[in-house]
Image (cartoon, grey):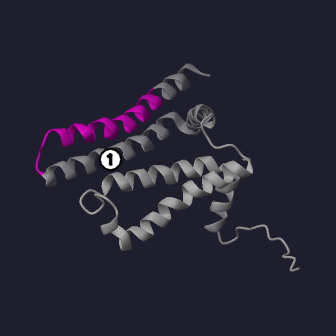
Amino acid sequence: MKPDYNLRLLVGTGILALSVLLPLIGIPFVTYLSLPTATTASISGALLLSGEVLGIISIAVMGKPGYAFIKGRISRIFKKFGPPQHVSLRRHRIGLAMFCIPILFGWLSAYTAPLIPDFTSNPLPYALAGDLLFIAGLFVLGGEFWGKLQSLFRHDGEAETTDLQVP
């Protein structure tokens, strides 16, 4: 790599880090200040927007090869934590339960809210638990399920069909 390119990569990486840290640290700090709601919302929105703009600027500074280099490094780190491609039948069934239970609970809770302890007065813990269970279910289901799920949202997505054999 040329020295000029190394400097561009270093500066671009710094701007990219700033684009992530600015909203991540700035928004909780602004909410901690106990400013009026409209002011807090405006500053938070400005922090998010400036983070997005800085992200685009960082890509422009480091260039396409630099961005590809950083993206490759980050994806290599997170690839270890991604879902496996193929899972066992037991894991698939557990993952489906984890995936479907929050959906069913969300649908049924509108009708059964008075029967669920503290649900009407404090629904946030139930919502957070359901969201975490849903996301964890996606990871437990593995990469093949991700592919099936993605094909649902593509017009040209293909599903495997098997011939049903009626006895």
**Image point (37%, 33%), residue name:** 18
User: How many numbered callouts?
Assistant: 1
Q: Position of residue 46 (x, y in %)?
A: 26, 48
Query: Of helix, strand and loop, which one carries label 1?
Result: helix
The quarter of the picture where the C terminus appears is bottom right
Is the residue 24 above or below the residue 144 in the image? above
**Foreground: 10 or 35?**
35
Residue type, mark 1 in image: Leu
Give the labeled residue for mark 1.
Answer: 48
Residue 110 picture quarter: bottom left
Q: Position of residue 97 (x, y in %)?
A: 58, 57
- Residue 161 drawn above or below residue 145: below
Residue that sits furthest to the bottom in the current view: 166
Residue at point 60% right, 32% down?
69
The quadrant of the picture occupied by the N terminus is top right
| Residue 23 sits inside the magenta stretch | yes
Up-down relation of residue 102 to residue 21 (above or below): below
Q: Please tell me which residue lies in front, 22 or 82.
A: 82
Q: Residue at x 18, y 48 (%)?
A: 40
Please state the horizontal and vertical placement of residue 99, each as a whole percent of the image. 55, 57
Q: Main secondary structure of the magenta part?
A: helix
Q: Which residues are magenta?
A: 11-36
Name the residue at 54% across, 23% down: 6
Q: Is residue 59 left or right of residue 167?
A: left
Q: Quick check: is 104 in the magenta stretch?
A: no
Residue closest to the eye, 30 or 131: 131
Quadrant housing residue 162: bottom right
Can you say whether 154 is above or below 41 in the image?
below
Q: Name the image quarter holding residue 26.
A: top left
* Residue 147 shown left or right of residue 162 in the figure: left
